[in-house]
Image: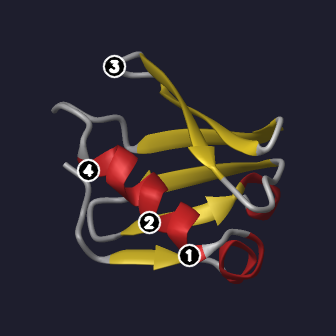
Amino acid sequence: MFNNSRYLTCGVDSAIPLELQLFLWECVDRLPEPRDHLQIFDLKPVGIMQGITHRSEEPEYRMEYLIPSDAPITEKLYIIDDGDHSTMLLASEY
C-alpha cells in the first residue's frame, strides 16, 4: 500500500504541472493491491494531448492515458514508496 505521506522533488515541482502531478498520484491510488513499491510514468506529447504510460514490474502492470494539455511534455518519472512515505521524482534525479 502506498503511504499517504507524499513528497515530490524540486525537479518535479518545476517541470510537471500541478494538475498532471495530481493525475499521476490518482493513477497510483486506483491501483489494485498488491502494488509495486516503484511506479514508472513515461510522458510524451501525442499531438496536442499528453500521453502517459504508467507501468510497474511486480505485479506487472501497464496502462496508457491521453489527457488534454496546453503544453504536453516529454519526461520520465518515478513514484517510490519506502514504507514511511511516497516520493515523486524525475528519472534524471534518481
Q: Relative to 84, does residue 47 appear above or below in the rendering?
A: above
Circle 3 or circle 2, nearest the eye: 2
Residue name at image x 83 percent, y 48 percent: 74
How far separated are the C-alphas under marks 4 and 2? 10 Å
Residue 41 spot, x, y in % from top left: 60, 41
Closer to the camera, 38 or 71?
71
Mark 2 packing: few (<14 Cα in 10 Å), some, or many (20+)?
A: few
How far separated are the C-alphas under marks 1 and 2? 6 Å
Numbered tag placed on residue 59 in the rendering: 3
The type of residue carrying mark 4 is: Asp
Is mark 1 in CB contact (under 8 Å) with mark 2? yes
The type of residue carrying mark 2 is: Leu
Mark 3 packing: few (<14 Cα in 10 Å), some, or many (20+)?
A: few
The type of residue carrying mark 3 is: Pro
What residue would you read off at disc 1?
Answer: 18
What residue would you read off at disc 4?
Answer: 29
Is mark 4 in CB contact (under 8 Å) with mark 3? no
How far separated are the C-alphas under marks 3 and 2? 23 Å
Circle 4 or circle 1, nearest the eye: 1
Closer to the camera, 30 or 36?
30
Mark 4 or mark 3: name the one nearer the start of the chain. 4
Residue 31 spot, x, y in % from top left: 26, 36
In the structure shown, which secondary structural element does the residue marked by tag 4 occupy?
Answer: helix
The type of residue carrying mark 1 is: Leu
Numbered tag placed on residue 22 in the rendering: 2
Q: Relative to 46, does residue 14 appear above or below in the rendering?
A: below
How far separated are the C-alphas under marks 4 and 1? 17 Å
Numbered tag placed on residue 66 in the rendering: none
Quadrant of the snapshot with the C terminus: bottom right
Residue name at image x 63 percent, y 64 percent: 89
Residue name at image x 74 percent, y 52 percent: 91
Circle 4 or circle 2, nearest the eye: 2
